């Protein structure tokens, strides 16, 4: 079974590594993955940078209905990254670590679902051990 990224250009390596964010060369603002224009100054002169993959759980929900390829139940939530912006993500449970607003989270890159004989790889956040 092959691995394919949920979106090209999301990770420092095609299906693993760190999330790629951007730094605006005009104003220095740090931006989320797949951004094409600076949200602060509207410049399109952006430099790709690896993101820390560390953040804090801001909000979450448990989904009890399937959504696209995601099979219920699954958790999803907003994580405020240490770079200062929020990112929506599937959340991965960790044994003995229930989700709590304000808890420290870390990036994991792994399969989200299977499609056409491929593992579709994406980002998830899980509680820090």
Image (cartoon, helix red, strand yellow):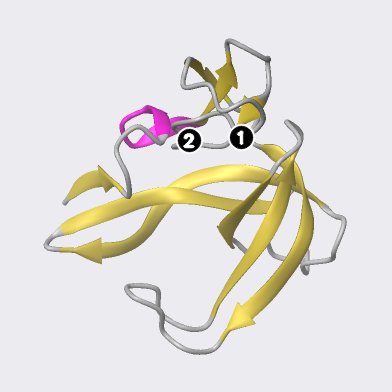
Return the residue found at the far top: 25
Query: SS of the residue at dot 2?
Result: loop
Q: Is residue 129 visible?
A: no
**Picture layout, residue 56 above or below residue 12:** below
Residue 11 - label:
none
Q: Is residue 18 visible?
A: yes
The range drawn in magenta is: 11-18
Q: Position of residue 54 (x, y in %)?
A: 71, 37
Return the residue found at the far bottom: 65
Given residues 99 and 55, the one toward you in this image is: 55
Q: Are marks 2 and 1 in contact (CB under 8 Å)?
A: yes
Magenta portion: prevailing SS class:
strand
Return the residue found at the far left: 116
What residue is drawn where x is 54% and y is 45%?
108
Residue 35 - label:
2
Badge 2 crowding class, 10 Å Cα cut-off, few under 14, some 14 to 19, many 20 or more, is some
Q: Position of residue 84 (x, y in %)?
A: 76, 36
**From mark 2 to mark 1, how far is it between C-alphas?**
9 Å
**Picture layout, residue 90 above or below residue 63:** above
Q: Quadrant of residue 120?
A: bottom left
Q: Position of residue 27 (x, y in %)?
A: 67, 15
What residue is drawn where x is 71% and y is 69%?
60
Say which residue label 1 marks: 39
């Amino acid at each position: 079974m092959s691995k394919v990224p949920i979106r090209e250009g999301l990770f420092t390596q095609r299906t693993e590594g760190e999330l790629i964010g951007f730094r605006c060369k005009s104003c220095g603002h740090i931006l989320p993955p797949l951004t094409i224009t600076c949200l602060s100054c509207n410049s399109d002169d952006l430099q790709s940078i690896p993101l820390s993959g560390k953040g804090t759980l801001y909000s979450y929900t448990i989904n009890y209905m399937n959504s696209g390829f995601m099979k219920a139940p699954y958790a999803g939530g907003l994580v405020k990254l240490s770079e200062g912006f929020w990112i929506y993500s599937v959340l991965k449970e960790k044994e003995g670590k229930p989700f709590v607003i304000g808890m420290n989270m870390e990036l994991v890159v792994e399969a989200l679902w299977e499609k056409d004989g491929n593992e579709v790889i994406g980002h998830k956040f899980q509680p820090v051990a």
